[in-house]
Structures are given as C-alpha cells and as structure tokens.
C-alpha cells in the first residue's frame, strides 16, 4: 500500500528550508511501505497519524503525540500517536487516523 499524501501536505518550499537531517527523516517516512496485513483480523486493524511539524523559531522536526484518557480500558494514560481502530464504515485507514486527530 502506497500513500502519496505526505508529498501533498509538506510544500516544497518548506522541505527546502529544513535542515538535511530533517529532510532525510521526511524521505524515510515517504519511502516506508506498510507490511501486508493479510492474516490479521480486520476488526483489530488500526491507523495512526504521524503529524510532523516544525515549531516556530526552531529547525528540527517535532511529532504530535496525545495522552490517552485515564478512563480507557486499554492502555489508559499512555502517550500515543493520534489514531485508533479502523471501523468497517471508515473509507480508508488515512480517514481513520485523521478522524481521530480532528
């Protein structure tokens, strides 16, 4: 499965302004291909959003993390990437990750 959305989110002028190390990080994310998910129970599939950004006044990349609610049965109060379980009605894993983010 290949996603080209990352190249649409990060404008070329932003990429050019990043230090070489940060550009390499973005290139690694772009070239990553998810493992085939055959053999997994589709009810248990999940998707996360890896929101990479540059804080004002800094040059390095940051990643957005969330803290799960203390009241959850699974992994309460843990730091995590935004996202969650893919529901059957979700049009795509990308939609799942973005839906949990917003």
Image (spheres, helix red, strand yellow):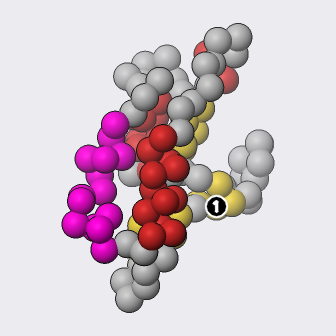
Q: Position of residue 38 (x, y in %)?
A: 64, 12
The residue that appears at 73% across and 57% down in the rendered structure is: 78
The residue that appears at 48% across and 76% down in the rendered structure is: 60
Q: Position of residue 79 (x, y in %)?
A: 69, 60
Q: Position of residue 4 (x, y in %)?
A: 34, 37
Does residue 3 appear left or right of residue 11 in this picture? right
Answer above or below: position of 26 versus 13.
above
Residue that label 1 marks: 67
Magenta stretch secondary structure, dominant? helix
Callout 1: SS: strand
Residue 57, image quadrant:
bottom left
Residue 26, image quadrant:
bottom left
The residue that appears at 41% across and 41% down in the rendered structure is: 99
Q: Nearer the viewer, residue 77 or 21?
A: 21
Residue 64 seen from this side:
no
- What's the magenta region? 4-17
Q: Residues within 10 Å of mark 1 (few under 14, many from 20)?
A: few
Residue closest to the far bottom: 57
Answer above or below: position of 72 versus 36.
below
Q: Is residue 7 magenta?
A: yes
Does residue 16 appear left or right of residue 30 in this picture? left
Residue closest to the far front: 20
Q: Position of residue 18 (x, y in %)?
A: 37, 72
Q: Is residue 5 magenta?
A: yes
């Amino acid at each position: 499965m290949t996603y080209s959305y990352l190249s649409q989110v990060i404008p070329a002028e932003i990429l050019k302004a990043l230090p070489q190390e940060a550009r390499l990080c973005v290139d690694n994310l772009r070239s990553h291909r998810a493992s085939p998910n055959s053999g997994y129970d589709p009810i248990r599939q999940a998707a996360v959003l890896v929101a990479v950004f540059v804080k004002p006044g800094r040059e390095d990349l940051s990643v957005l993390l969330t803290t799960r609610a203390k009241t959850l049965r699974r992994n309460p109060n843990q730091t995590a990437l935004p996202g969650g379980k893919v529901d059957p009605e979700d049009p795509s894993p990308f939609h799942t990750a973005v839906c949990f983010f917003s």
